[in-house]
Image (cartoon, helix red, strand yellow):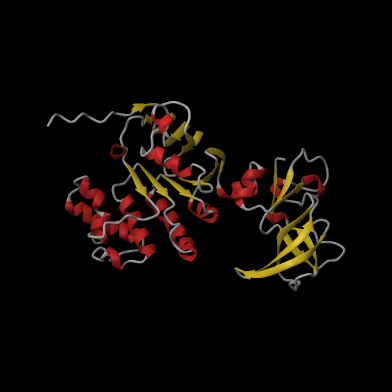
């Protein structure tokens, strides 16, 4: 057998952490030939992830977020652009030489290995001394809340426990970058919400730089230091969770985040909405985005109360009780034509189907977006 060719060494460039520059990912024969054509999954995306930061790629199915993550990992060829880590260009560097950790929707644990040997897999591949392996396994099982599970068989674990083992295994070799692709989406909502908090705590405790792909807003906001919203292969906005929610960069971003209606901002600007400090005046074409909690049922027939502006009148279509509160579906015109929206009924009698309801905009649940 001939001598094995050495893996290419990354070329150096300025900067630290992960840097994605104008990356394009295409599928189809054209992409393999380096030509235009085929299906463009990622269309000129640029972003940065600082050392120790957790960035979530958030978007609907088919938006390109997983394709971007796979391109960073080296699992998909980059048709154009560059991926750099700590200033090193990763072009031509194979997956196994990048020093990245990978975690997917299905933990892909080895059923013939117990928990401890699953976690130790990457350490064994790197020929880490046994005593060091055992110490690292104990440390990580404690971090992910599975202390004492080393000898447990994988088949005896719950779904959440298996994902904790998969996370510990991905972290064991101390990866330069951890890439997580929808790691919690196969779990039920309650478990997913609890585990999202645990994943965030583990990543922060271990100081891990990570990119977390998800289509779930709550999951992204819980886990990530910053959230990058994608649509149709493009990056729409990158911001910390609270900033992203309070100041969506566009109507498209706000709509994806769950804002349910858009009305001319000049018609009503509640104090505090998206940084606004009062009503009236020129709105520069801006829209008022009404969020899931931005419309409320009130009792005042002649006014909605301080800070809520002029009341609106709607007709109740139905109501549900969910997560400790009543949500009333109403047909109402907020200034952009009649729409069917959801209003929160807290501290008031819940109107019945067909009843008329007095409604008010709540500034805490609204934001201003460019028209």
x and y percent of residue 95 in the render?
31, 38
Quarter of image, res 10: top left
If the image is split into quadrants, where does the N terminus sit? top left
> Image height check: is 87 above or below 202?
above
- Percent across and percent down for residue 365 are 68, 55
Question: Image quarter for residue 230?
Answer: top right
- The residue sitting at 60% across, 49% down in the picture is 256
Residue 343, horizontal then vertical, whole percent: 71, 62
| Image height of 370 relative to 154, above or below | above
16 sits to left or right of 146: right
Residue nearest the viewer, comparing 282 with 102: 102
Q: Point out the residue furthest to the left here.
A: 1
* Residue at x 18%, y 31% (from the top left corner): 4
x then y, percent, for residue 151:
23, 65
Q: Residue at x 46, y 48 (%)?
A: 213
User: In which quarter of the view is residue 79 placed?
Assistant: top left
Closer to the camera, 165 or 17? Answer: 165
Residue depicted at 37% across the width and 55% down the height: 106
* Front in this rendered view, residue 127 or 51: 127
Q: How many marks?
A: 0
The quadrant of the picture occupied by the C terminus is top right
């Amino acid at each position: 057998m001939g001598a094995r060719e050495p893996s290419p060494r990354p070329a150096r460039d300025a900067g630290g952490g992960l840097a994605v520059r104008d990356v394009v990912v295409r599928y189809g024969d054209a992409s393999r030939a380096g030509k235009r054509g085929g299906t463009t999954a990622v269309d000129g995306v640029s972003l940065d992830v600082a050392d120790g930061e957790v960035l979530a790629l958030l978007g609907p199915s088919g938006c390109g977020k997983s394709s971007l993550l796979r391109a960073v990992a080296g699992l998909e060829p980059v048709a154009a652009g560059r991926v750099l880590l700590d200033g090193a260009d990763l072009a031509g560097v194979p997956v196994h030489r990048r020093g990245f950790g990978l975690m997917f929707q299905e933990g892909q644990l080895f059923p013939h290995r117990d928990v401890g040997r699953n976690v130790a897999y990457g350490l064994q591949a790197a020929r880490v001394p046994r005593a060091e392996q055992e110490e690292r396994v104990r440390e990580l099982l404690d971090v992910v809340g599975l202390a004492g599970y080393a000898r447990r068989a994988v088949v005896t674990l719950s779904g959440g426990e298996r994902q904790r083992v998969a996370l510990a295994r991905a972290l064991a070799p101390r990866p330069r970058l951890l890439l997580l692709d929808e790691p919690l989406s196969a779990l039920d909502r309650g478990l997913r919400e609890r585990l999202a908090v645990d994943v965030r705590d583990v990543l922060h405790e271990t100081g891990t730089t990570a990119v977390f792909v998800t289509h779930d807003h709550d999951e992204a906001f819980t886990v990530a230091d910053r959230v990058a919203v994608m649509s149709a292969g493009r990056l729409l906005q990158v911001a910390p969770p609270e900033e992203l929610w309070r100041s969506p960069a566009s109507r498209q971003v706000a709509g994806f985040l769950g804002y349910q209606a858009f009305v001319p901002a000049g018609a009503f600007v509640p104090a505090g909405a998206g940084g606004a400090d009062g009503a009236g005046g020129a709105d520069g074409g801006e829209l008022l985005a009404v969020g899931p909690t931005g419309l409320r049922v009130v009792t005042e027939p002649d006014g909605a109360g301080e800070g809520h502006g002029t009341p609106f009148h709607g007709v109740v279509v139905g109501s549900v009780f969910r997560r400790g509160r009543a949500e009333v579906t109403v047909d109402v015109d907020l200034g952009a034509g009649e729409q069917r929206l959801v209003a929160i009924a807290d501290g008031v009698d819940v109107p019945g189907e067909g009843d008329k309801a007095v409604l008010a905009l709540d500034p805490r649940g609204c934001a201003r977006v460019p028209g």
